[in-house]
Amino acid sequence: MQSHTLIATEQASKYLQQLCKHFAHKTEVTFTETEGRCVFDVATADMAAKEQGLEVTITADDAAGIDRGQMVIWKHLERFAFREELPEPVWQAA
């Protein structure tokens, strides 16, 4: 199962790197300035910094994993982007 969102921000690369560096202390992470992957216990988050914002795709075996992955990425992103009012993500099944 997968879900996908695009979070509009001019700081997509910054947030992608910040998220990946943060999670690297806890889980398997690979990233560059424009792409990142975080492998959690119940889901995987693939991220891409685009001109329009931060693309996030969550992959999991079940709906609970999708929900957990979405929540973990969004809650951390909200904290890291406290100076910017990010739009609430609209997740779509892929």
Image (cartoon, rainbow, N blue to C red):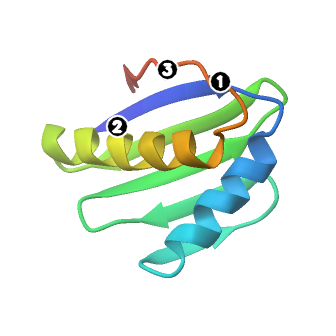
Return the x and y of residue 93 as percentages of the image width and height. 34, 23
What's under tag 3, amino acid-wise?
Answer: Glu
Residue depicted at 64% across the width and 39% down the height: 82
Q: Say which mark, if any, is on residue 85.
A: 1
What's under tag 1, amino acid-wise?
Answer: Glu
Disc 2 crowd rating (10 Å Cα; few below 14, some 14-19, many 20+) is some
From this view, report whether residue 2 is shown above or below residue 37: above
- Quadrant occupied by the N terminus: top left
Horizontally, is 62 left or right of 58 in the view? left
Disc 1 crowd rating (10 Å Cα; few below 14, some 14-19, many 20+) is few
Q: Which residue is mark 2?
A: 2
Which image quadrant for residue 8? Answer: top right
11 or 27: nearer the viewer = 11
10 or 59: nearer the viewer = 10
Return the x and y of residue 24 as percentages of the image width and height. 54, 77
Horizontally, is 10 left or right of 88 in the view? right
